[in-house]
Image (cartoon, helix red, strand yellow):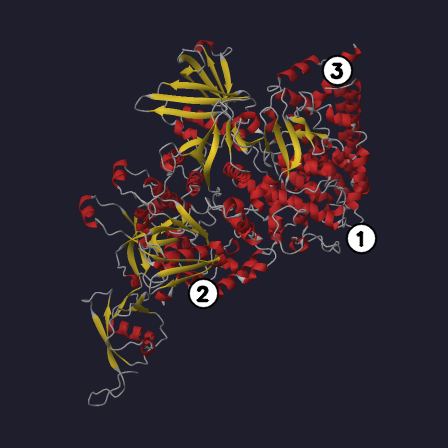
């Protein structure tokens, strides 16, 4: 930990800088609330981290008090200004937009703030009750209705009340937060503020915004246990803080942000997992031939029924014997209910199977270099353990496969058994994200302004319905719903049906083979369950997602993707749907005009994509970075140990304070 | 009109006499004789028959059945010539709907009137509409097994036969709900009872009876059932079914579309029952762990349905004693379920306290179980030296969140232990709790089911059933072309499976999605299937007619064309095209 006495100052100034931004920009006023919380959160959290608690207690220092006083003052000021700001907001739209943009690239807390704002919108409209934080956010709403004056005042009053209410609620809600140091694939790190309601998906979205990566579905948060030499990706629906809470204080574990092909491999080539005929390794060539349409129907069959189908998987694996470095070969079978093995002298019939492990309480990890570490027969190892176990233990199960293909099949099979449909939902969301992102960049700036607000909207629901158990937030539905609508479902099917009917009699060709097969958007999901829009129709992010689409991405674009010519006229129709998707990936949403589907939109910025979003974006990023001394990233994170990703922002501050005092004295 | 005579009484037109029996194929039945010509329309003939009988009665359901041709004369505008009817035709003027006794998936018997003249597909659809089961295309009828009927009749006490034969449904529209059930069930106490029988799980069967029921001991035993399916494209009459016969109603195609606990109480319940009997009679195998899940769910479902707590969410059962409450609370906590958390904070948190004996296995320790005062609240288990010290600091406190709870119960040995595996960074610590008399109710708690509503629990049961690897496979014994031994063909909703008869191993799987076409050669009773890449498969059917295999394949393909947008409307023609054969026409 190389904190110097400057750190504290830097952090201070960053913090204050953020506060300033807050007070200036409309959408941001929300920020204050989150800030006051950290301290409380800390107490909450202290259960798991005694050291922290101690350091807190030790910090009765004036420094801290002063800091807090400042914060609080700023907050209340912000509150008051909000109302005024609201009025001005409609005029200042562009201004605030850029401000916000910079916020985005800058401090994590700010992001949080804007998210919250987003929630407000959706809540306001939909009347969502639970999330306390929201009401505040109504702010963004105001911009649109600039006309009626008297009404506006009323609204403003109402909003002010709501804000107060929200602030109170926020104070009540003890939201736990951590500053997480995320290792990027270029060896740099970024520190993020993650609150306890955020899912891995939210954090990824956050990182997308910060890194300008291509947002493809392979990106994931990845946890590494250097000591155990195991690693795994966070599932997108997992609650990040919860996972990190299992780490010990002195942990060397790390969180990475990187691309992993394996993450959603099953959705890109389901045949490799579902049609791999046992025993016979005929396969690669035949299986990879599968066309997009068949993949789609295979996925639907496997994931969209009343219950998810777990790939049939069985075969001999090596099992590390408890506490020894010897490995035994055993015949294992995967079932939805767990992994089983065939006891000696028994057959494979269900009744004879012995249960090896069930998945409820364990996570699955890849083992790295276990050949060396544990004398494993190969390096294709996977590990099952309770997430809380952090040290070597007889309760960790080590298994070893003959080859990489088998390993991938087992790991994916176990994830499907453990997470079921959620996995598919996650994928669809990731696809929607990736698709929108690439569309966004393709279309360039067409209406930079318009989508802005939607962007916020989308994040709203996510954070808006925090679910303690890490369930998928509802937002997924809406996104997919959009996509779904986009596809001309029914029509496609009508076309198809006749095709079938035309070949009556015994020798009826299989329906899917019908000539219509070349229809572009194959109804991705016949059942079009409420949950599922199919990702198939969303344009693929570059090079990701199961290929196999014949036509150029544009053809698949669900309706919304407005071709350049689109202007006000076009916007209105898709509003509700359209608004949601773009948001996700849109980085710094100029909050302004977004509102009501461009009712007010001046003709969209010159269609000739001046890359408005891009241009808008980079500057802030650049601008913001400076204030954020790179050191800050490093400092906060390491509090615990080198890699300790979890730390509260405030506790970092305290650390730094302590350090400083130490130095001085 | 036919029957023009000269003064001497000779007929001068081409008319002739046609005898028609009145009733259901009873040779002793009364008959009427009509004078007709080849030009007479069936409609006119019907009219004459009714005139001749000269009895006040509603004849609207009656039609003429031609015995030799095994055919109904339903086209009233057709002439006798067109049908090819001559004077020697044996015709019966009888009702098209006749009573049958249905054996439902829940094994209860129900009398109702089924259509004997429509293709079975339609007849089943009508039955399902009466019973309030959506998606009738997934069900069909089987002949009851013949064996031992006589013996049993002597022995067994009369079982209750529910009766819906008097209930008439207005055609077309889905029945409206009245007092929480489709209106036609609310007519009388009997029909209401019938609805409850249909929509609520049955109590567990008598274990003794259960033991006596036959179980398949091999794959070939499992093929027996499938030889009894009736043909969907022909009517009951054509298939030799008589009024009063017993038929089984079962889910035939294991592809359950749009299963919705809220709108499908009867369908869900009957499906649950079918799944349950499937498991009880070992038609499908599962592991011990899976059995525990089924047992826990079944236990829970029984409890709910017996307490009359239908429809409402569980957990508010006043009958729950504090143990149950605490256990279920534990479940909630372990699951971390959101909505109930809110409730919990509003109500007092149940606490469970008792003297338990605790054992913590350690190396080099000979200590056994020691008695402690144990308090279990929220997710925390605290234990004290004795009850008096309870308000003070406990000896130890364990947070059970995320821990594994393994019941270790041996009733005959009076051993009721709970093994807790409490996770920590270093691994798991094991703790054994030994209770004086904790009953195996732990089982229920064990599986996180205590909070489920009846419908949710049933759905969960069905899902667990669907997750079994062998789920939804219908077995038929076949002989592959070029092979010298019989083998098993498994038919599932997405694939055909070739299975070794003796060992039970899967030899080969073909998916419907790769199927180009299939043909049935009715003469040599052979099914030939072509898959992509010029893979051809042909087999003759041994245990069932090849029509049954043909219908299974066509049926599954039909089911895969369903989609939500079309709602419940069925493309019956398509179904019949896919499942019918030359034989049928």
Q: Chain of mark 1?
A: A
Check the image and report above or below for B62 versus B363. below
Q: Nearer the viewer, residue A544 or A75?
A: A544
Label 3 Cα neighbours within 10 Å, binned few <14 / some 14-19 / many ≥20? some
Label 1 Cα neighbours within 10 Å, binned few <14 / some 14-19 / many ≥20? few
| Residue A45, image quadrant | top right
Look at the image and tell me in which quarter the C terminus of chain A lies. Answer: top right
| Residue B325, image quadrant | top left
Which residue has dot 1 on it? A608
Q: Nearer the viewer, residue A519 or B181?
A: A519
Residue at the spot 64% in from the left edge and 54% down from the top edge: A556
As helix, strand or loop, the secondary structure at mark 2 comes to loop
* Disc 2 and disc 3 on one polypeptide chain: yes
Q: Chain of mark 3?
A: A
Q: Position of residue A658 (x, y in %)?
A: 74, 15
Which residue has dot 3 on it? A659
Q: Nearer the viewer, residue B119 or A521?
A: A521
Q: Which comes sooner in the sequence, label 1 or label 3?
A: 1
Q: Position of residue A100 (x, y in %)?
A: 77, 37
Q: Which comes sooner in the sequence, label 2 or label 3?
A: 2
- Alpha-carbon distance for marks 1 and 3? 54 Å
* B74 lies left or right of A556: left
Whether residue B315 appears in this view of the structure is no
* A444 lies left or right of A356: right
- Alpha-carbon distance for marks 2 and 3? 82 Å
Q: Position of residue B344 (x, y in %)?
A: 52, 27
Q: Position of residue A377 (x, y in %)?
A: 52, 31
Check the image and report above or below for A215 versus B430. below
Q: Are marks 1 and 2 in contact (CB under 8 Å)?
A: no
As helix, strand or loop, the secondary structure at mark 3 comes to helix
Which residue has dot 2 on it? A504
């Amino acid at each position: 930990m190389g904190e110097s006495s400057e750190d504290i100052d830097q952090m201070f100034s960053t913090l204050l800088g953020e506060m300033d931004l807050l007070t200036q920009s409309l959408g941001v006023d929300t920020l204050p609330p989150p800030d006051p919380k950290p301290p409380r959160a800390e107490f909450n959290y202290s259960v798991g981290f005694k050291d922290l608690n101690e350091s807190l207690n030790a910090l009765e220092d004036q420094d801290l008090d002063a800091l807090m006083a400042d914060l609080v003052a700023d907050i209340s000021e912000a509150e008051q200004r909000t109302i005024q700001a609201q009025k001005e907001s409609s005029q200042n739209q562009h201004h605030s937009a850029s401000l916000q943009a910079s916020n985005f690239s800058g401090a994590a807390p700010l992001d949080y703030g804007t998210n919250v704002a987003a929630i407000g919108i959706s809540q306001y409209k939909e009347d969502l009750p639970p999330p306390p934080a929201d009401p505040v956010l109504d702010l963004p709403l105001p911009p649109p209705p600039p006309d009626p004056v008297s009404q506006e005042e009323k609204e403003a009053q109402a909003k002010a009340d709501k804000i107060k209410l929200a602030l109170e609620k926020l104070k009540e809600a003890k939201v736990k937060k951590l500053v997480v140091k995320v290792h990027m694939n270029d060896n740099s790190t970024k520190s993020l503020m993650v609150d306890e309601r955020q899912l891995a998906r939210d954090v990824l979205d956050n990182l997308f915004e910060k890194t300008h990566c291509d947002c493809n579905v392979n990106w994931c948060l990845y946890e590494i246990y250097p000591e155990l030499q195991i690693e795994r990706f966070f599932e997108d629906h997992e609650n990040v803080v919860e996972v990190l809470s299992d780490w010990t204080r002195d942990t060397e574990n790390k969180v990475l942000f990187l691309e992993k092909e394996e993450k959603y491999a099953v959705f890109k080539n389901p045949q490799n997992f579902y049609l791999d005929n046992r025993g016979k390794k005929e396969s690669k060539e035949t299986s990879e031939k599968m066309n997009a349409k068949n993949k789609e129907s295979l996925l639907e069959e496997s994931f969209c029924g009343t219950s998810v189908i777990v790939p049939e998987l069985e075969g001999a694996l090596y099992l590390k014997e408890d506490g020894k470095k010897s490995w035994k070969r055993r015949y294992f079978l995967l079932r939805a209910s767990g992994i089983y093995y065939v006891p000696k002298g028994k057959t494979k019939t269900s009744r004879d199977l012995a249960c090896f492990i069930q998945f409820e309480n364990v996570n699955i990890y890849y083992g790295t270099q276990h050949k060396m570490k544990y004398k494993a027969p190969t390096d294709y190892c996977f590990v099952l353990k309770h997430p809380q176990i952090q040290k070597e233990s007889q309760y960790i199960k080590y298994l070893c496969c003959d080859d990489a293909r088998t390993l991938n099949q087992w790991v994916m099979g176990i994830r499907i058994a453990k997470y079921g449909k959620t996995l598919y939902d996650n994928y669809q969301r990731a696809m929607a994200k990736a698709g929108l992102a690439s569309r966004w960049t393709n279309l360039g700036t067409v209406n930079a302004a318009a989508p802005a607000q939607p962007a916020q909207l989308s994040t709203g629901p996510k954070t808006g319905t925090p679910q303690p158990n890490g369930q998928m937030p509802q937002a997924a539905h809406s996104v997919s719903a959009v996509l779904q609508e986009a596809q001309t479902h029914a029509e496609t099917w009508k076309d198809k049906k006749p095709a079938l009917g035309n070949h009556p009699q015994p020798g009826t060709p299989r329906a899917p083979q019908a000539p219509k097969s070349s229809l572009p958007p194959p109804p991705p999901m016949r059942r079009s369950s409420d949950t599922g829009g199919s990702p198939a129709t969303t344009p693929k992010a570059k090079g990701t997602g199961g290929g196999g689409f014949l036509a150029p991405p544009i053809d698949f674009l669900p309706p919304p993707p407005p071709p350049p010519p689109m202007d006000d006229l076009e916007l209105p129709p898709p509003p509700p749907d359209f608004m949601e998707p773009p948001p996700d990936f849109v980085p710094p949403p100029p909050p302004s005009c977004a509102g009501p589907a461009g009712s007010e939109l001046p003709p969209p910025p010159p269609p000739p994509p001046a890359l408005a979003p891009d241009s808008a974006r980079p500057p802030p990023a650049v601008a913001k970075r400076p204030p954020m001394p790179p050191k800050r990233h490093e400092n906060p994170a390491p509090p615990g140990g080198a890699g300790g990703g979890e730390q509260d922002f405030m506790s970092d501050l305290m650390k730094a304070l302590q350090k400083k005092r130490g130095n001085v004295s | 009109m036919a029957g023009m005579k000269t003064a001497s009484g000779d007929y001068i037109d081409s008319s002739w006499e046609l005898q028609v029996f009145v009733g259901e194929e009873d040779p002793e039945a009364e008959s009427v004789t009509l004078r007709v010509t080849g030009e007479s329309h069936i409609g006119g003939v019907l009219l004459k028959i009714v005139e001749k009988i000269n009895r006040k009665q509603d004849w609207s359901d009656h039609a003429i059945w031609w015995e030799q041709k095994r055919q109904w004369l339903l086209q009233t505008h057709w002439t006798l010539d067109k049908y090819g009817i001559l004077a020697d035709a044996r015709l019966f003027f009888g009702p098209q709907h006749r009573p049958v006794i249905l054996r439902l998936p829940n094994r209860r018997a129900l009398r109702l009137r089924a259509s004997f003249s429509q293709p079975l597909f339609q007849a089943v659809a009508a039955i399902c509409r009466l019973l309030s089961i959506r998606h009738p295309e997934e069900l069909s009828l089987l002949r009851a097994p013949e064996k031992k009927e006589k013996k049993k009749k002597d022995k067994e006490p009369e079982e209750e036969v529910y009766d819906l034969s008097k209930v008439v449904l207005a055609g077309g529209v889905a029945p409206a709900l009245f007092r929480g059930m489709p209106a036609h069930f609310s007519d009388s106490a009997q029909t209401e009872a019938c609805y409850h029988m249909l929509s609520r799980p049955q109590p567990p069967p008598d274990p003794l009876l259960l033991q006596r029921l036959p179980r398949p001991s091999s794959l070939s035993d499992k093929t027996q059932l499938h030889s009894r399916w009736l043909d969907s494209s022909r009517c009951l009459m054509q298939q030799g079914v008589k009024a009063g016969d017993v038929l089984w109603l079962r889910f035939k195609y294991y592809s359950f579309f749009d299963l919705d606990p809220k709108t499908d109480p009867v369908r869900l319940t009957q499906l649950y029952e079918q799944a349950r009997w499937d498991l009880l009679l070992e038609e499908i195998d599962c592991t011990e762990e899976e059995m525990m899940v089924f047992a826990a769910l079944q236990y829970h479902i029984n409890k709910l349905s017996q307490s009359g707590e239908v429809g409402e969410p569980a957990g508010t059962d006043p009958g729950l004693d504090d143990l149950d409450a605490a256990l279920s609370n534990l479940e909630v906590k372990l699951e971390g379920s959101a909505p109930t958390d809110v409730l919990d904070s509003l109500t007092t948190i149940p606490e469970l306290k008792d003297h338990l004996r605790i054992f913590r296995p350690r190396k080099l320790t000979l200590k056994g179980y020691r008695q402690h005062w144990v308090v279990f609240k929220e997710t925390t288990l605290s234990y004290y030296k004795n009850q008096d010290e309870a308000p003070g600091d406990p000896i130890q406190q364990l947070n059970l969140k995320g821990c594994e709870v393994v019941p270790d119960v041996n009733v005959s040995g009076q051993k009721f232990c709970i093994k807790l595996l409490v996770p920590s960074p270093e691994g798991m610590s094991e703790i054994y709790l030994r209770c004086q008399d904790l009953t195996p109710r732990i089982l229920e708690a064990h599986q996180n089911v205590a909070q489920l509503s009846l419908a949710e629990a049933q759905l969960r049961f069905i899902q667990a059933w669907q997750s079994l690897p062998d789920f939804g496979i219908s077995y038929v014994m076949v002989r592959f072309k070029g092979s010298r031994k019989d083998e098993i063909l498994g038919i599932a909703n997405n694939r055909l499976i070739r299975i070794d008869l003796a060992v039970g191993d899967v030899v080969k799987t073909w998916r419907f999605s790769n199927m180009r076409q299939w043909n049935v050669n009715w003469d040599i009773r052979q099914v030939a299937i072509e898959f992509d890449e010029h893979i051809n498969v042909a087999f003759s059917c041994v245990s069932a007619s090849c029509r049954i295999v043909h219908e299974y394949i066509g049926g599954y393909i039909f089911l895969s064309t369903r989609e939500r947008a079309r709602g419940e409307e069925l493309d019956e023609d398509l179904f019949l095209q896919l499942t019918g054969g030359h034989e049928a026409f």
